[in-house]
Image (cartoon, rainbow, N blue to C red):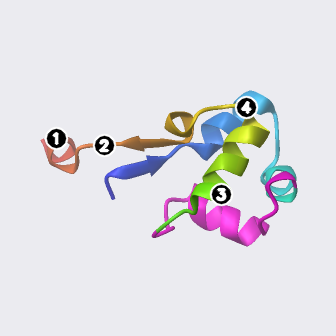
Amino acid sequence: MPIVVDIDVMLARRKMSVGELADRVGITPANLAVLKNGRAKAVRFATLAALCAVLDCQPGDLLRWEDEDAACG
């Protein structure tokens, strides 16, 4: 998928666990894992906003686009 989720990067920078982030955002750890591992088909803007508020970051710190064609080389 061309959208890459970098929640792990922000968790490491904030020295925060997945469980703590899930609690503070108000989603289940299982749903956060689906998003974190790039298996989510969609994310609600309210969830993205809550993630950004808790992690003190911008949406672009959590999500980025990668050109699949360029990766195939």
Question: What's the residue at 45%, 70% (across, down)?
Answer: 41
Mark 4, secondary structure of its residue: loop
Magenta segment: 24-41
As shown in the figure, which amino acid type bears the numbered disc 4?
Asp
Q: Quickly name the residue at label 3.
A: 46
Which amino acid, mark 1?
Answer: Ala
Identify the residue position indicated by label 4 in the image: 56
Local secondary structure at mark 1: helix
Identify the residue at the far front of this view: 46
Q: Earlier in the sequence, mark 2 or mark 3?
A: 3
The N terminus is located in which quarter?
bottom left
Neighbour class for label 2 at 10 Å: few (<14), some, many (≥20)? Answer: few
Q: Quadrant of residue 30?
A: bottom right
Mark 3 crowd level (few <14, some 14–19, many ≥20, 10 Å Cα): few
Residue name at image x 66 percent, y 35 percent: 10
Q: Earlier in the sequence, mark 1 or mark 3?
A: 3
At which x and y percent is residue 17? 82, 47
In front of the other: 69 or 58: 58
